[in-house]
Amino acid sequence: GLTARFMYCMPQSIVGSRKYRTQPIPAEVSRCYEVVIRNLLEDEIPKTPKLINLSPEADKLLESFACEVESKMKTEYADIPDWTGKLVGAVLRISGLLCRAANSHCSDFLDLSDSMVVDEETMAGAIAIGRYFTEHSRAAYSLMGADDLVKQSQYALDGIVKNGLQEFTRRDIMRICRSFKTADTVQPVLNHLADLGYIALKESGNAVTKGRPTNQSYLVNPLLYSQAA
C-alpha cells in the first residue's frame, strides 16, 4: 500500500520549447507566497489540537465527490483501486491545508482562537486538486507497471490495432501476442477489456453449456480505431 499514499505529478516537459527571456513572477504574488510559507513554518504546535470543521456546503460537496469516486472504482478507476481508495481522505486533508493557508494573513496567525471552517469554495479547490492528481497517478501507475493487468491489456490492445482486427477469438490474441502462453493468462485480459468497453463478447446464439466455450468471439469497439488515428 505504500505507492497508494503518494500524490503523483507528471507535468509535460517543456524541454525544446523553453525561452531564454521569461516574464518574472509579479512582486505581489511572490510576497504573498513568502508570507504564507513563513507563517506556516513559524506556527507553533499548540498543546490542544485546533479543529478544522466543514461547512454544510463543503460537507455536501465532499459527499458528492466520494460517491462519484466510489461509483468508478470498478470501471474507470479499476487500474488504480488502491490509490483511489485513499483519494477522498487525501482531498479532505488538502482542504484542511488550504483552509489553514488561507488564514495565514491574519495578524494573530499563531494564536487563532476560533476553529477554522472549510467553506464550499475551498472544498471545490481541494477536489479540483484531487482530480488533477488522479489523472497523473493513472499515468504514473501505468509507467511503474504497478498493475500487470493494465500492462497486459495495453499489450493486447496494441496487437488488436496493429492487426486491424474487427472480430477475433481468444486463440487469435494468443497468436499475435506471443507472451500469452495459455488461455488462463489471456482470459482475464479479455474480461478486463470487455469491462472497459474496448471489446464485447459476440453472442453466438448457441445453447448454453457447462464450461467455457473454446471458440468464443469478441467484437472490437470501432471507437478504438478512431482514437488510434
Image: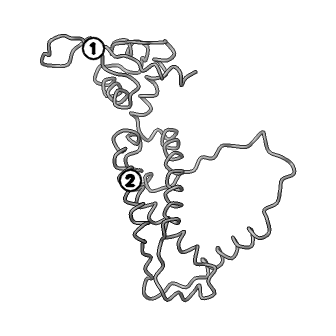
Residue hosting label 1: 216
Classify 10 Å Cα crowding around label 1: few (below 14), some (14-19), many (20 and above): some
Residue hosting label 2: 1
Point out residue 153 in the picture as x, y percentages from the top left corner.
42, 28
Give the CA distance from mark 2 to mark 1: 37 Å
Image quadrant occupied by the C terminus? top right
Name the amino acid, label 1.
Gln
Q: Is residue 65 left or right of residue 130?
A: left
Q: Is residue 155 left or right of residue 169?
A: right
Q: Secondary structure at mark 2?
A: loop
* Scheme by which the image is coloured: one colour
Q: Nearer the viewer, residue 176 or 132?
A: 132
Q: Nearer the viewer, residue 75 or 45?
A: 75
Name the amino acid, label 2.
Gly
Up/down of 220 relative to 18, above or below: above
Q: Secondary structure at mark 1?
A: loop
